[in-house]
Amino acid sequence: MKFANKYQRRYFMPPYPCLDWAKKEYIDKPPVWCSVDLRDGNQALIIPMSLEEKLEFWEYLVKVGFKEIEIGFPAASDTEYEFCRALIERDMIPDDVAVQVLTQSREHIIKKTFEALEGCKNAIVHLYNSTSVAQREQVFKKSKEEIIEIATTGAKLLNEYKAKTPGNFRFEYSPESFTGTEPEFAAEICNAVIDIWKPTPDNKVIINLPVTVAESMSHVYAQQIEYMCKELHDRENIIVSLHPHNDRGCGVADTEMGLLAGADRVEGTLFGNGERTGNVDIITLALNMYTHGVEPNLDFTNLPELVEVYERLTRMTVNARSPYSGQLVYAAFSGSHQDAIAKGMHFREENDPDHWNVPYIPIDPHDVGREYEGDVIRINSQSGKGGIGYLMEQNYGIVMPPKMREHFGYTVKGVSDKAHKELKPAEVYEIFTKTYVDVKKTFEVTEAHYTQGEHFTAEVTVKIHGETRKLRGIGNGRLDAVSNAIKDALGLDYTISTYSEHAIEQSSKSKAAAFVGITNPNGTVSWGAGIDTDIIVASVKALVSAINNSK
């Protein structure tokens, strides 16, 4: 990067330190949310949405809970004008929702904007003009006084057209390129507009301070916002709004710090769609608040559906690692992560089910419409015994003994490594059954009967290489008796070193699982599992599989 000396700071610090925001720990209440997906988001699409696509998107934004939605620039094109009229004429705007429309400070544009809003019950008319040094000097070639005149002329025209147009109209002003504007001048031009609109408690004015282009670190933006909150006229009747873009990858941080600094409102988009690197992602902002116990007042309980609607209508894709909504954000492949998550889930169930504190997962996937199965524990060659065991327990009710679970973990990892792919839960279960359940290499027990006296006696029918034989054994229990019968008849030398059993609660039928580990003369352990409605039958099946696995 040998040309760094060609760049210089393009932002301006306030004339005095503004650091009250730094004393706050977190955002304790949600802002007013305004979606700009249908304006800023739509104009950034390679293929802008059609009228019917916009209408469907509008309905979904209303469903999510947005009460303010910017729909476009109705004076800019027939398509945006028709969209505005369609919402009004089809009666698609709920009484508690306001449409927001953008306009420049030019009378014919303002006139057509109000024509587009005819019959609208609630609307926000958003006036803007550029104020930065770069825009003033390079684009408009105008003085500060001339730039202020553009804004005040537009503000007066909005007052005039509001007076002769039925409806509840509120006003918003944006000094576009705010982050490249001297804070003192930004305050001066905003106050000039405020003085014309004369806000009241019942008719507040929105002053929107956009990160049109990100120029600084987030703490600088916070100081700029705090300065504006201190310098704006009639602050108690002003709604300070943020509209951050993500050029520096700091859109969320800029917004959060701006809210700490006193802002009341946020304009953004779902998944951060917008010009260049995008707008701030409202989903991330809202769910960040949610993780701190603050209700965001937006419904993101079905993110998979929201992703589907968004991708279909915008033809954009949601990154697999996008916070909260990405396909892989709840997935753990690492063995140590999986083990910690599995233990955390058990700890939560046993100790504090009302509070979420599971390692590596900041939010309960169920709260946003995701599932633990297939979303949280994902199996590949990096997985460990803890995660694989948790998957088997959650999906199939199989709880293996710890040492068997370790053996199974290595087996599954080996299959994934060789196939060079992720394994689905059904594939993991199939490996389990092939490895431990349906093992009939050498022999099988086809029938067993028991009598109980001082000890248990087992009359066992087996098939050895297809040949049927009758065996008899005595032991301390039924499984021990069967084991002794097999060892005596086949001349085997092993000990049952591990045995466990449990009911399979996930099954719709009453079934039990049994697990047997036998230690061979060379010290190795062979494992087997059995599943049956009869626990004794399941135990014998597990023993037979373990013996077959030992040869």
Image (tube, rainbow, N blue to C red):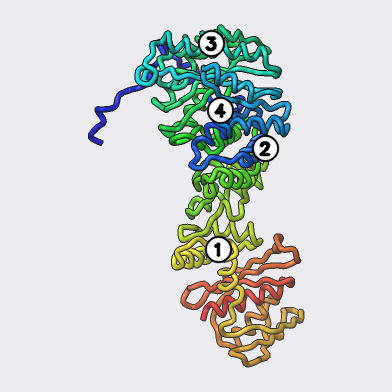
For disc 3, the neighbor class at 10 Å (few under 14, some 14 to 19, many from 20) is many
Dot label at residue 73: 4
Q: Secondary structure at mark 1?
A: helix
| 148 up-or-down from 420: above or below | above
Q: Amino acid at mark 4?
A: Phe
Mark 4 vs mark 2, foreground winner is 4
| Marks 1/4: CA–CA distance | 61 Å
First in sequence: mark 1 vs mark 4: 4
Q: Nearer the viewer, residue 322 or 76?
A: 76
Q: Which residue is mark 2?
A: 59
Q: How many marks?
A: 4
Q: Position of residue 531 (x, y in %)?
A: 67, 71
| 535 up-or-down from 330: above or below | below
Mark 1 vs mark 4, foreground winner is 4
Quadrant into which the N terminus falls: top left
Q: Amino acid at mark 2?
A: Glu
Q: Amino acid at mark 3?
A: Val
| Marks 3/2: CA–CA distance | 33 Å
Is the residue under label 1 in contact with that under label 2 (CB below 8 Å)? no
For disc 2, the neighbor class at 10 Å (few under 14, some 14 to 19, many from 20) is few
| Marks 3/4: CA–CA distance | 21 Å
Q: Secondary structure at mark 2?
A: helix
Q: Which residue is mark 3?
A: 193
| Marks 4/2: CA–CA distance | 19 Å
Q: Secondary structure at mark 4?
A: loop
First in sequence: mark 3 vs mark 4: 4
Q: Secondary structure at mark 3?
A: helix
For disc 1, the neighbor class at 10 Å (few under 14, some 14 to 19, many from 20) is many
Dot label at residue 405: 1
